[in-house]
Image (cartoon, helix red, strand yellow):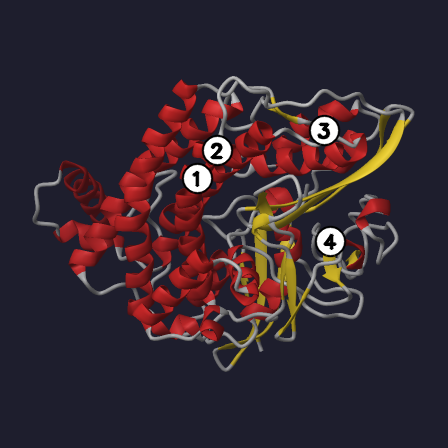
Amino acid sequence: MNKVTIDPITRIEGHLGVNLDIESNRVVNAYCAGEMFRGFEVILRGRDPLDAQQITQRICGVCPVSHGMASVLAQDAAYSISPPDNGRLGRNLIQAANYIQSHILHFYHLAALDFVDITAVAKYQGNDPQLLGVKAWIKSQIASGVPHPGAPFLPRYTGNYIESSELNCLAVKHYLEALEMRTMAHKMAALFAGKMPHVASIMPGGITERITADKIAAYSSMLKRLQVFIDEAYVPDVLEVAKAFPDYFNQGKGCGNFLSYGVFPESSKGKKMFPSGVIIGGKSSEFEEGKITEEIAYSFYSSSSGLKPAGGETVPDAAKSKAYSWIKAPRYGGQVVEVGPLARVLVAYGKGDDAKLKGLVEKVLGALDKKPQDLVSVLGRHGARAVECKLIADRCGEWLDQLKPGEPAFAEFSVPSSGSGVGLTEAPRGALGHWITIKDGKIGNYQCVVPTTWNCSPRDDKGTPGPVEQALAGTPIADEKNPIEAARIVRSFDPCIACAVH
């Protein structure tokens, strides 16, 4: 048995090492290692509760909005307040813009380069100035054989890439356009967020930015441009990759269990655009927050194992024997579950309440001659993100129409001397929960369970591998020196280790 280490996994957020046991060119065992400790939960103890939504946003520069949202939802619950409609809609529009930029970032700037042959641009014969610039740069890198420091394209694993030069060049063109689209999505969010990243306007009770006709018009104008890019570039490009790599509908299936907390409230009564739910062993059920625990047998912590997050502990132990990751192992009713866009889409599709979602999923499946069960795969995760991105962008227009300029977006509140609350939402990468306990007007305990804590978890107390570890098991590796197959699987989950080792 040979051991292959990919450390660090590039084109993700944070420091993730993956160790593979390979026999006869196939992965037998996989181990995901979060390689640092940050201690945000420790930092928050004793602070003013109103510091929480600002401090926790610093957990991540890619998805700070979702951490801020989870924090204010937890505080909403602890303070027994609910935002007015403008506050709820403003939060949705901020978070939706962050989703759009994150999904575009993931496909074009992180994952697509596992499939696109960037060197094909060296043979480009057109007159697009951007592609001509990339062509000159690529040719100089190939000629010198020395990669430019910080280069986004080279070096890379050798392996099978898209063969069509035309499709490769189009994908690179869209890669460059996606940089502008992400900037636009940030600007869109900042209209109601105050700034991006690390937004200033979200507070318990709603948002502090005033809702004006000018902001609505500006958001709408940028949204329309993003919708065109999603419809004419993002979704078609994902379909082209899926057609070029059909084997990846059979790779990276993982545990087959899924969890969604739900996200984007449509009213104050609890209905959400993406509903909460759980799929275990192919059977759907309603989500129960009390079934969440965190195990630490193979994590660098000496705190008690199997605790519920509301009473969770963060006691680092860098010398712990058998441990191999700074990520804990969350479990739902003792089960390993995957979270993320695929989980959200499958849960919503299974409930059948959203005709638009069901229709778009079936349209994509029809274009690829696939069935819903085929989505549980590397390409299914990419397809789910693209479907979700389009649905969210389209729903933003409806939320804009519901805003009422001049009306309040914020509910007054006071911080109690004691209390507790749970904030459950969905970051672009999956289920995100914050748990706060207030004692003597200060934070007594704060715990976060984030998407990549679920997906990149190490083995639990029973020795059961986490979702990514299970997805890697059985993967064929053609060349152990170029394990591109494993990298494609890991990146399909869009890991954020900075979040996971918060």
Crowding at mark 2 (Cα within 10 Å: few <14, some 14-19, many 20+): few
248 versus 137 height, above or below: below
Verify CB contact (< 8 Å) between mark 3 and mark 2.
no
Precedes in sequence: disc 4 or disc 2 = 4
Q: Can residue 11 be seen here?
A: yes
Q: Amino acid at mark 2?
A: Gln
Q: Which residue is tagged 1?
A: 398
Q: Residue at x 60, y 41 (%)?
A: 267
- 351 left or right, relative to 462: left
Q: In the rendered structure, which amino acid carries the disc numbered 1?
A: Glu
| Mark earlier in primary sequence (3, 2) | 3
Q: Which residue is mark 4?
A: 328
Q: Which mark is residue 52?
A: 3
User: Residue 320 lies in what quarter of the image?
Assistant: bottom right
Give the CA separation, mark 1 to mark 3.
31 Å
Image location of residue 169, percent across then percent down = 20, 51
Mark before the other along the chain sequence, 1 or 3: 3
Q: CA distance from mark 3 to mark 2?
A: 29 Å
Quadrant of the rendering where the C terminus is positioned: top right
Contact? badges 4 and 2 (CB < 8 Å): no
> Is the residue marked by circle 4 packed among few (<14), some (14-19), or many (20+) residues within 10 Å?
many
The residue at 74%/30% (across/down) is: 81
Q: Which residue is mark 2?
A: 402
- How far apart are the alpha carbons under marks 4 and 3? 21 Å
Looking at numbered disc 4 in the image, what kind of residue is underneath it?
Lys
Q: Mark 2–mark 1 contact, CB under 8 Å?
A: yes
Helix or strand or loop: what does disc 1 sit on?
helix
Q: CA distance from mark 4 to mark 2?
A: 41 Å
In the image, which is nearer the foreground, mark 4 or mark 1?
A: 1
Q: Which amino acid type is shown beneath numbered disc 3?
A: Ala
